[in-house]
Amino acid sequence: MRFTLPTFAAVLALSATAALAQPANYTGPSNAPQAATAAGSYSGPNNVPLMTVKQLLETGRDDQIARLQGRLVSFEGDERYIFEDATGRITVEIDNKDFPAGQTISAEQKVELTGEFDKGLRKTEFEVDHLSLLP
């Protein structure tokens, strides 16, 4: 199959637009457009320790698996958000595919994040593997 230059340019433009889209289903502070995704999740028992932001920042080890409960208070760009609980704030990285399919999350919605603590010399953040909504 041969593509003409205009067809190739149109395909390239569409793929570039998708790469720049706002993370799926987050309605908190941001200037980026919304995008939709679909993903499944596990809802059974969880033995990953529940921690506060303060506990994680003070005692967490690099690559430690943990759970946090609180709110995503702002979108910082490039899949990064500010997460807040009653003890503090931390930057979290959430892939678009990790948002619950078909559900919108506002800055007021309580969520639970499960993931890995990334503690480095220049940055400290929480890399989210699973996000779920709390009642």
Image (cartoon, grey):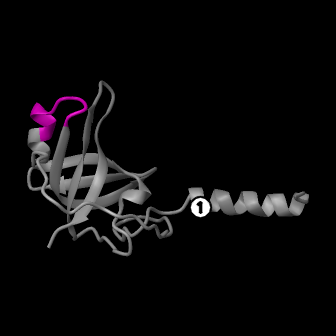
Quadrant of the rendered structure where residue 28 is? bottom left
Give the residue at x 9% y 56%.
86
Residue 2 drawn above or below residue 120: below
Q: Residue at x 41, y 53 (%)?
A: 95
Q: Is residue 44 left or right of residue 7?
A: left
Quadrant where the C terminus is found in the figure = bottom left
Residue 16, percent from left and from top:
65, 57
Give the residue furthest to the front: 44
Residue 84 position, x and y percent, is 19, 55
Tell me, yes or no, whether the highlighted magenta stretch contains residue 59.
yes
Query: Magenta span covers which residues?
Result: 56-64
Residue located at (11% from left, 48% from top): 47
In the image, residue 84 sits, relative to residue 51, either above or below, namely below
Does the magenta portion include 11?
no
Residue 51 location in percent, x, y? Answer: 9, 46
The amino acid at mark 1 is Ala
Looking at the image, residue 11 sits to the left or right of residue 17; the answer is right
Reading the image, the residue beneath label 1 is 18
* SS at circle 1: helix
Corner quadrant of residue 73: bottom left
**Front-lying residue, 10 or 75:** 10
Extreme residue toward the top, this view: 121
Q: In the image, is 67 to the left or to the right of 131?
A: left
At 91% from the left and 60% from the top, the residue drawn is 4
- Residue 13 position within the rendered picture, expressed as x and y whole percent measured from the top left: 72, 60
Crowding at label 1, few (<14), some or many (≥20) Cα neighbours within 10 Å? few
